[in-house]
Each structure stands twice: as C-alpha cells, then as structure tokens.
Image (cartoon, rainbow, N blue to C red):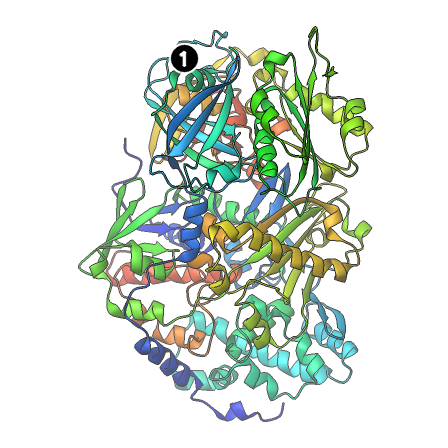
Amino acid sequence: MKFYKDHYDVIVIGGALAGLSSALMLAEKGLSVLVLERHNLPGGIATSFVRNGIEIEAALHEMMSIGSKDHRLKVGKFFDDMGVDIDWLKVPEAYHASLPGLEVTLHPGFETFAREVDQAVPGTYEKVMDVLKLCHTVFDSVNELSIHPMSKPQMLLKHEAFVKTAGYSTKEVLETFHLPQQALDLLSPYWIYVGSGFSELPFTIYAVLMADYVGYGSYIPHKFSHEMSLKMAERAEDMGVQIEYRQHVDKILVKNGRVTGVRTARGDEIHSDYVISSSYPNNVYTHMIEPLSEVPEKAIQMVNGRRLSLTAFSVIMILDQTAEELGIRDYSVFRGETMDTDQCFEELKGLGPYRYITCICHNLANPDATPAGTCSYSITTLPRVDGWKTVKAEDYDRVKHEAAKQLIDDMSSYLGFNLLDHILEIVIETPMTVARYTDAWNGCIYGYAHTMEDHIVARLQTAEEEKFIEGLEFAGAHQISGDGMGPAVTNGRKAAKNVLDAMIAQGRAQGR
Amino acid sequence: MKVKNFLKDVTGASRVTKARLQAFENASAVPVARDPIREAVQERHPDMTEMVVTEIRPASPTSKTIRFSRTDGKKMPIFYAGQYVSIALPIGSPIENSAGSSGNGPDHVPNVTGRIVCRPYSISSAPYEARAEEEPFIEITVRNSGKDGFAAEYLCHGLKAGDHLLGSIGHGQFYYEPLRDSKKIVALAGGAGITPFASMAKEIAHGTMDAELTLLYGSVSADDIVLKEELEQIDCPRVKIVHVLSGDNPGWEGEKGFLNAELIRRYAPEDASFFICGPQAMYRFLREELKKLNIPARRIRYEVFGQARDVTALPGYPAEKKNDVYTLTVRRGIHEDQIPARACESLVTACERAGIILLTDCRSGECGFCRTKVISGEYYVSPENDGRRAADKDFNYIHACAAYPLSDMTIKIPIV
C-alpha cells in the first residue's frame, strides 16, 4: 500500500501553529507540501480537550498581533490573507495587577493604559506615555525590518530608536525614565510572556511585547485555540496540503550536507529536498539527523550555547458556579509578591512555591466558554525546566499536587472563597504534559531564552551562518521571533520564506 | 523625551551579535542527547507495553481475572486506581460468533483475521502491585456471560498463560483526584463494573491511597458477584463493602433490591464523592435517585460505558436504517479502500471487520483517540457520549468508535 507520493516539494515536521503557517504559505505558492504531526490533531499546545462533556482550553491563549477587523496587525492579516477565518473575541482588559500595595486593572490602548497607571500612581502619565511611545517606535521598526532588511547606515537613519536601544536590557532602558517603583511595577507583569528577568531581557523584546499587547490588546478564538489550529489545518488541506496525523518523524535523512527526506517511526521513507522541522534543534542535531556524522560541531555548539526558556505549569479548573456568582471580576490577573522580575525568574528554577502567577477566567472574554452555571478558571506559572528534571516517576504525582495546591490556596485567599469547594473538573498540566503531547525538547514551550547573549537583533544578523544543513529549516518557538502563539506564526512564515528563497535561487520556484 | 544615555550608542547591534557568537564559541561541542523530561514521559506513559499472561483464574462463575507482567520483567507503568488498559488483541483465527449472539451487536465481529483490535478494560489490580519490587503486575477481570462480545470470549477462552499481548496502560478519567473529590468515596457498582473499585479498595487497604471507600455493589444473584472472594479478603477499616442482590435469592440475608436513594442514604457519609460504574441502564436509574439526595454535580462521577450494545436504543437514532449496509471509503494518506459498513455498527467496527486498523482507547466516544475526519456522508453520534470539541463538530470530525454511518461515507484515518 502506498500512503505517500514519491516526492514532496517540502515536508513539514509538526502540525502546530508554526508548521501550519509554513504549510499555508508554501501551498499558496503552489508547492506540494506534506505535514506530519505526531498527535491526532493539529495545534500542539494551541489546543483544547474535553472532560465530561466540557471543552477546556489547554493553553494560556491570548494571541498578540491580531488587531481589530479595521486595523489588523501582522498575524491577524496573515490569517485574513490565507483565508483562515477565525471568530476572534477581544480580551476585555490588558490585565489586573495584584502586587504589593497595588490592585489595578489596566486596559489596552496607550492613553487608557497610561491614564490608569497615573490614577494608581499619580503624576506618572507623561513618563509612562514616553515609555510606551518608545516601545511603539521600536515595535514599528522591528515589523518593518523583519520584512525589509536594510544596511546599518540606513537603519540608523530610519530606525534610530531601534538601533540605539538594541544593545541594552529592559532594566537599563527603563531605569533612564526614573519612574516611581510602583509605576514601574505596573509596566512589568507581561515579562513572563517572554520569560526573562529585566536585567537579561533585551529591551527590543520588551518593546514589541508592550506595544503589541498594550497598544492593540489581545484576542482569543471563540471556540478555543483548537478553532484556530483546526481552521489553519482545514484551510491548508483545501489548498492541497497533505496532513497526516499520528505520524512521528524519527529521522531527517541527510546526504552530503543536504536534506533528502524523512523517515517516520512507522518506517516510511518520504523524499523531499526541503524539510521544515518544528522539533527543537537540540533534538534534530542529537537524534534526528541520519547519519549524525552530518551534524557539524558548530551546530552542537549553537544548541549548547543557548539556554532553554520556560515551560508551563497550569492548574485548569471548571468551577460549579458562574464567575458572577463567585465574584470573579477579571479576565486575567497577574499576581506576585514582588515585581522584581529577576527575583521572580530565580524562583522559577524550583518546584514551588510559585509566587508569580497568572490567572485567567475564560468566561469573562468568552461567555460561552463553559456550560451554563459554570465557569473556567486557570492558574498558570511558567517555571524553568531545571526543577522538574529532578522529579522521579514515583514522586511526580505528589510534587504536581503540592505545587497545584499552593497555587489554588494562594488564589483562594486572593479571591475570597475556597476554590477547592467548587471544582467540577481539574486538570494539572506540567512540563511532562507538554512533552507527552508535543514531544517538545525538555517539555519547553518557549524555545530559547531571550537574553543579551541570544538577542533577537543578533539572531537576525547571524541567521544565515546558523544554517548547517542545506534544505533544513526550523519553525517554532525556538526560532528568531521566540515564544508565543503570534510569534509561532511569524516563525513559521519565516521558515517558509527561507525555503522559497532557496528554491528561487535554485530555479525551483518562481518569485513573487 | 530627555536625552537618554543609550541614545548616544549606535553600536548595540554589533555588540549583541558579538556576544552571541562568543557564547557559541565558548560552548561545548559535545552533544547533549538526553532529555530527562521526555524520558520521564516515556517511563510513565509508554505508548505500548509488551505484556505476558502469567496467570488466569476464575473471578466468578462467568468471569476470569487475567494477570499480566511485562515481558522484560520490569515494573508496570504507573496508573491511578480506576483507570483502564487498552489491550491490543492479535486475534488471528476466525471466531464464528462463538459467544452465541445474533451477530448484530457492535462487539460481535465474525471472521476476524490476523489483525489488531483494541479493547479497554478497567484494571482490577491495585497501582502498588504494578510497582512492586518483586513480580510487578496488572490484572483485568473480564466477564463472559455469553453476551459480552468476541473480545471477552477470546480473553476468557482463547488466551492462555505465556501468551504475549500489547497494552496501553493508564487511561481514563475515572479516578480519585484529591484536589477535587471528597476523601469519603461512595462507589456504586453494578455487575462487571466492580473492577475499578476493586483496584481502589486494594490501594486504600495497602495505605497508598488516602481515602475511605464505601462500596455498594449490586448484582442479580450471589453467583454473579465478580471478585467476591478477593473483596472479602480486604481487611481494612477504611473499606466497607455492601452487597446488594436484585434477583430472587432464597436465604440471602443481606441488602436486597436496587441501589436506590433510600439504600444510598443509609450508607453514604456526609459530603461524599460518588463514583458510578456499571451498565447504562443503571446510570439512567441512578441519575434520578441521586437527584433525590441533592448531591452536587461536582460530587458525582460516572465511568464511560463502552460501545452501545443496541444502537437503536440511543436517543435520536433512525431505527428504520438499522439493517442498511453502506459503502465506506477509507482514506489513509493517498490510499483508499472501499468496505461495507453497517448502520448498526460503529465506523471503527466496520474498519475492524475489513482488517483496517483504526486504533481506539476508550471505545466510548470520550477520549478522542480515534478522532476521524468525515470527508462526505451522513452519520449518527449519540448525544449521550459525544466527547467532541466544538470546532471538530463544525468541521465534521467524529470519534469513530461512537459514530454510525447513515449513508455511503468517505472518511480519513491515520496511517498505522
């Protein structure tokens, strides 16, 4: 029996947001594309599951870079352009910050946000606006430069703020604004979405994050992340992409420095001159390349020289009353005993107690999220994988439950009622859960940490030198734009563009 | 904006690029191939475990307990008391309705040749037994009363000690979750539905599950009680077992009748969690009885009940179609097969009859392991066990173990 064609223009390993974005873009150019996904549905962690008839979101799933119908940002526009029609719901607030001495709800829109910070910490409006304006200028530059690279002198001329902040950490740049500590605290909670403390985090990344989320707000798909993943997969299939589920790619076949195809765990050898891997470079260069002798030392040094970023620990609950009945007022709450992000980051090395946490009540953005009379409440922290690596199989349940209990107790005291008295369903997701369903290296959802040694500007500069095998591209959180569902799409598009450029160079595909 | 220090600096981009290259140059060139997180997942949730039958013994006049060890002698994967194993049965020889049924039920697959069908069975042994230092094992207890299908027939009569089977261990949501459930568990079991509770009872008695169990176990007659002797051997103040017989049993001194509100009220402690496992008819009865006791929804958990024995009894099934046979086109990759599919049998059964492997876990429409794309055609899914995601419904995905053809159909399934 023959399940595959003799040859595909491109094989994409992994049918999550990045891989499907690659597939969509390549199919649009008329290429034959095969997507091999190891799970039985698309999306990776951008998915949902069903417990006792109740659908539950699997991920902390606010999408950035979508924008309103009238003012689409790059990811929203990509979906529109590809004909992926998602029913987006706007998240009502930026976040509620629950920090020492501060209980403040902030809403998207620069002026609104700055005004609300000013109400909490009077006299800060101008300075906060200055920070946000700088962020927005850098954000615009990054968006333009990621599509139209230019020479350094040109960059300095047209993208001065971007160039001049590139060498500095978030901490260094924010300090120059001399904001009162509490105002600074209110500008800090999103740090967890990029997973590095401010002394390490490139300001460029902070700027993009703040401009995008605070400037334009975030969006969620009406029927959970699975709506987005499934609609991408369906659209790709409509465009001729072959997607095969439950196909685990074991090997990427390489000959004389060039990709020739893949082999699945089932034993199928499938031929293609281009492979886009969603699997981490760590896994590809230490397990998947066949033969491993084709992997140059520099590739190993590159993966060893980078630090894995964060993974996820989530307690997801369906509660037996509505948010209104329970007195839950905010869609998202960021809560911490300190907003010293470097200190928060240190704490994430362990197995708890986790003091910096993010909570989402899904129903407050999507009233249909759960059956009538119930609501969904999730508590998430994004630990580093270090602590979880040490957990023995026999201790796993105890560790998982202790960590979950601490988060539940902490939020119960914040909410003023005991969550434990209202749990209809509970699911605890750990790094092991991530690894089980996505096979992500070390269960890591965030790729490599954004640091001053692994800076997005440097990633862009050295991207060409970090291609070690011809025809092999990568797509996923481990790529240039880093973590998050929006950046996953951008990373997937970049991989597709690299393949197209290579094909054009070899006369295999036509340019625009 | 004031002039900031950084605004004088135009070399940042070069600096961070140098820092990156330097970091790579300083890094080790020795591959780090180990991934402790994925290794932990492999240990805990191996896709399949190679098992050997080490013992078969009667559990009642009509049921047997089958013990499995790993072929390599290592510990079994960790599972929670109440979970099931999905066993892949390599049934190779024709079984001609030896169960003596009409052949019309979903489980009755005659002339099965050389292939794999999967069946879920609650694990009746305790988790601690799977992790024992000496001879770790799991057990399932299978009833074969003559109407339990060909898989039960095969397990009870075709299988012998020394046979090898593949099992996927530790599935299902029917287990005690300490953050959700009351420590005081009331188990309501009917017939062969005793098995998950046997596992819980033994785990509690062993001191490795911190809960109290009141087990109300309904059978027709004393002879029908599955695992009777094993249950009697459990000597633990935290496990209380009450047998309830519904049939005419002269000389029976114990509880009689059905598991109803009155009986439950007498035995159930305050603020208990109710776990229910048994035939579908019992669920329908108990839903009403538990309403009378005002038990909150979060304190009631039902085990899934497997494929429907009689699809025509399901709500909204068009009974006039039950004898129809349609053409089912099954797509795997670019390959297509055309096979017959009976309206009264699930799409999984149609594939199994034709020797096309469509792997399943729960076979109850719940878990989604057999998620399948419908390209064209009409089908029926019971609202009682529709475990699909909302977007999946919009795009015609089904769980093939719980979907029935109502016209010629084309589906796409994973390549196995």
Please report, as a chain letter, where disc 1 is located: B
Which residue does the numbered mark 1 point to in the structure image?
Answer: B110
Find numbered disc 1 in the image and state the secondary structure of the residue it sits on.
loop
Quadrant of the snapshot with the C terminus of chain B: top left
Q: Examine the image and state in which quarter residue B45 appears.
A: top left
Is B284 positioned to the left or the right of A196 in the image?
A: right
Among all residues in the image, which is located at the extreme left?
A: A256
Pinpoint residue B308: horizontal percent, then vertical percent: 57, 20
Q: Nearer the viewer, residue B390 or B304?
A: B304
Front residue (pair A129, A102): A102
Number of marks in picture: 1
- The answer to whether any part of residue A43 appears in the image is yes
In terms of depth relative to the viewer, which is nearer, A307 or A29? A307
Q: Is residue A33 visible?
A: no
In the displayed structure, B65 sits above or below B30; it is: above
Q: Residue at x 79, y 37 (%)?
A: B270
Q: Residues within 10 Å of mark 1 (few under 14, many from 20)?
A: some
Amino acid type shown at disc 1: Pro
Residue A198 image point, x, y percent: 56, 78
How far across and how far down the image is residue B390, in percent? 60, 40
**Relative to A224, is A62 above or below?**
below
Residue drawn where x is 31% and y is 35% of the image: A3
Quadrant into which the N terminus of chain B falls: bottom right
Image position of A116 (left or right of A267):
right
Q: Splitting the image into 4 quarters, where does residue B336 fall?
A: top left
Give the percent coordinates (x, y) of residue B154. 42, 17
Q: Is residue A75 left or right of residue A463?
A: right
Q: Quadrant of residue A453 in the image?
A: bottom left
